[in-house]
Amino acid sequence: MNLQKALAEFITFGEQRDDAISVIISTPAKESAPIYTLTKPVLIHVLTRCVSNEIELDDLELWANVVDSRDDIDSGEYEGVIFALSNSEQMGELDRQKLEKLLALLKE
């Protein structure tokens, strides 16, 4: 699995996510320009899966931290959302109600 495929699997919580994590961990984040762009449909899909209990809140927070820390993931358009998801100390503890509100805003 190449890095681009690994990033896509990780970002979408795909079936090969564990393999993708191994590839991502073995590749430094600062090595390349963005090769994956976080899109609105993908972000909505991930948040929807979390609201429906398919993805744990802790996993979502970890996911957001990885997205935020990697230079090879372009999340610029949704930087505020990623910041809110990855900084519960500053933004308040994540819960499903907050995610539902965030989803409503994204779907507008």
Image (cartoon, grey):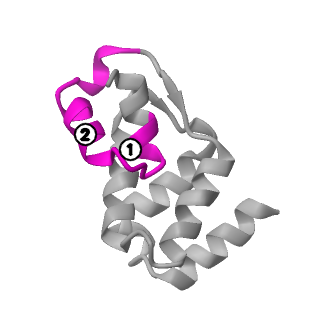
Which quadrant of the structure image shows residue 58? Answer: bottom left
Label 1 residue SS: helix
Point out the image quarter for the C terminus.
bottom right
| Residue extent of the magenta highlight | 8-32
Q: Residue furthest right?
A: 108
Percent across and percent down for residue 28 are: 22, 24
State left or right for residue 41 relative to residue 108.
Answer: left
Q: Nearer the viewer, residue 18 or 94?
A: 18
The answer to whether residue 61 is above or below residue 72 is below
Identify which residue is drawn at 50% across, 28% down.
Answer: 36
The amino acid type found where label 2 is placed reads: Asp
Kindly identify which numbered label has been placed on residue 19: 2
Q: Position of residue 48 (x, y in %)?
A: 59, 68
The x and y percentages for residue 68 are 40, 43
Mark 1 closeness class: few <14, some 14–19, many ≥20 residues within 10 Å: many
Q: Residue at x 66, y 68 (%)?
A: 103
Residue 18 on the magenta span = yes
Most frequent secondary structure within the magenta stretch: helix
